[in-house]
Image (cartoon, grey):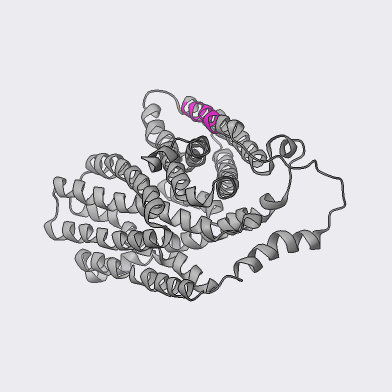
Amino acid sequence: MEVLKSYFRKPILVLLFLGFSAGLPLALILSTLKAFLVDRNVDLAVIGFFALISLPYSIKFLWAPLIDSIKIPYLTNLLGRRRSWIILTQILLLFLIALLGVFSNSDDLSYIIFIALAIAFTSASQDIVIDAYRIEYIKPENQAIAASMYIYGYRVGMLISGALALFLSDQMSWNLVYYFVALTMFIGIFATLIGDEEKVKKIKDKSFNFISWFKNSVIDPFADFITRPKWYIILLFILSFKLTDAFAGNLFLPFLLEIDFTKTQIAGIVKTFGLFATLLGALIGGILVKKIGLIKALWTAITLQMLSNFGFYYLSLIGNDVTSLYGVIFIENLSGGIGDVVFVAYLSSLCNIRFSATQYALLVSIASIARSFLSSPAGIFAAKFGWSNFFLLSIIFGIPALLFLFILRKNQKGN
């Protein structure tokens, strides 16, 4: 009961709504924007290249040192170092999303491309500073609880700018849809304003020294990280943690379509029912870390992620069966939700509060390599070995994470 009470404390609830603010732009510039372009009769080849708009999310560590070190005149003194950056990015996002509505009827696609890229860059910047705020503002023992609530808000934000926006686009014009989504940014702005943060001392005028700044804001965060024992094993563990999920998940939807599940069934079961399973997993993940500790929770999460892929293997044997798909999606998304929360808590534990924005952004970027690059050859394996063997192979891809965790745990005991 005490653990459940932790979810309703003010700092945790603030993270819930900041998660909403972080998740809102993502679906908007990915799936929803593509639907808008289809309605505008844009060529599919052109639409495919719009995937590059999400690039700022993968390289955000490049400008994280700036956000970690630069103070915003007046706002930093008023709200604090992190909240000043959060409110600035939120106001910019509100303006940029509304701008999409303004130019939604324009014949010049370059306006849409430029605004969407600006949204991606600003949204990635917001992610950097919210992650830093969470690491600094929430006590270490409550990081998993905060992560689970953040993920709740993130998923709801994506639901609003994704599924709800698509539904509304059938009822009203696209410019009104974008105006509506822009207005929902006030939820995150309100959360930022009611949040707490220690005020910083007033900015003193002094000459800027680039060499000193570069050392303190760029070199020191990376130098600090590599002082950790087995830091290279830590990076390999981060790289491999979600590999088993990413490898199988990369082709799961094509697999379902190939065994004759309809798009309506996929939308209802995988996207909607699966969301609730993910949220339940996020809740369990936070409780798990609180109850058994981070290391044991990591062992549990990796094992569940591996075992859940047996559900895909089972489907590949029996073929189209709606009841089985419900069961497979529940197990897969439940384990994925647990894994997400435990992983976020682990990444947060690795960050030095002095460099939280830079270090966390770097670690997240490394983790995304599994999803973006290491899982890219999945289609080759599926074509060569068939679906059943492909999903069995995806289970094996979880073993490196277990081995790296064993080495880290052994090293931890030795210290």
Residue at horizontal 48 percent and vertical 71 percent from the top: 412
Q: Name the one closer to the observer, 228 or 238.
A: 228
Report the side of 151 relative to 252 (left or right).
right
Q: Give percent across and percent down for residue 295.
A: 41, 62
Report the side of 386 relative to 209 (left or right).
left
The range drawn in magenta is 177-188
Q: Name the one closer to the observer, 12 or 281.
A: 12
Q: Name the one closer to the observer, 78 or 358.
A: 78
Residue at horizontal 25 percent and vertical 39 percent from the top: 268
- Residue 382 vertical position relative to residue 132 in the rendered view, above or below: below
Residue at horizontal 33 percent and vertical 67 percent from the top: 398
Report the side of 182 relative to 321 (left or right).
right
For the stretch drawn in magenta, the main secondary structure is helix
Q: Give percent across and percent down for residue 100.
A: 54, 33
Residue 99 in view of the camera: no
Residue 166 in view of the camera: yes
Q: Give percent across and percent down for residue 226.
A: 60, 70
Residue 173: quadrant of the picture: top left
Residue at horizontal 37 percent and vertical 35 percent from the top: 163
Residue 219: quadrant of the picture: bottom right
Verify whether residue 330 appears in magenta.
no
